Image: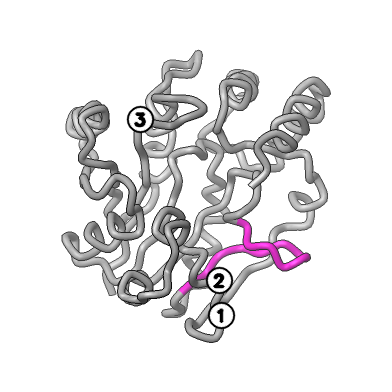
Amino acid sequence: MNIGVIIQARMGSTRLPSKVLKPFKNGKSTLSILKEKLSIFNIPIIIATTTANNDDIINDWANENDFICFRGDEANVLKRFVDCGNKYKLDVIIRICADNPFLDVQLLKSLIESYKNQDYLSFLKSDGTPAIKTHYGIFCEIVSQKSLVKILNTESITESDRQHVTPFIYNNPSLFSIEYLPIPEYIEKEDFLRLTIDTQEDFDSSDFIINSSKDFFNEETKEILKIVKANPFLIEKMKSQIKINSK
């Protein structure tokens, strides 16, 4: 069983263009942070970007930093994933969004250890919301290549399904083998926590947290939460961005 990480990334974000390579004060970008965090796993890591000209810079960055870069369909992200999985002969994909420099590596380890050939495995809130749909920004998901191919070949899928890749799976549980791990309670109860980056305000909050951290690359979400709680202005900014940019 061939497993690999695919990070979806593009420069053309509407709300914060070029965010995936925008440097924080420590000189690192989201993509470079993810590269360092994921280096502990002995599996292929692939950036899946688009064939658009403005994504040439991602391809160049990947080549300069010994990253595999796949370029595919700009609008149909699902097809981009399927084509990438096919090219690198992946059976199982760990799907990560380049919006999330606070990816919790310990939670990812738990996910990998819990994977038993399901079509889909991720975390779930107690109210039944898949973690990937939340604003926490620390989770990812594991999905089988065959399930992505199945979706792509389903005539009834919508443009939203093509753009967001996995919702068709968890919206049609009778068609797939799905399993969830519960979101840790200490995270779920802090519903103000927003660590994904969609806007300049998100970026600024993340920059503050990263530069307030003693050992950012090795710190779990518990330690990040301590920084947020010690700075109430971060909580207010996060609440505001959640309200404005709710998924």
Q: Mark 1 points at which residue?
A: 173
| In the rendered image, the vertical position of residue 49 relative to residue 85, given as above or below | above
| In the rendered image, the vertical position of residue 25 relative to residue 111, given as above or below | above
**Tag 2 and tag 1, C-beta contact below 8 Å:** yes
The secondary structure type at the circle numbered 2 is: helix
Residue located at (55% from left, 65% from top): 122
Q: How crowded is mark 1: few (under 14 residues within 10 Å), some or many (20 or more)?
A: few
Q: Residues within 10 Å of mark 2 (few under 14, many from 20)?
A: some
Q: Which of marks 3 and 2 is nearer the N terminus?
A: 3
Residue at far top of view: 25
Alpha carbon distance from label 1 to label 3 = 33 Å
Q: Name the residue under label 2.
A: 170
* Residue 137 in the image, given as x and y percentages of width and height: 59, 43
Give residue 230's quadrant in the image.
top right
On screen, residue 118 versus residue 35, left or right, reads: right
Q: Type of residue at label 3?
A: Met
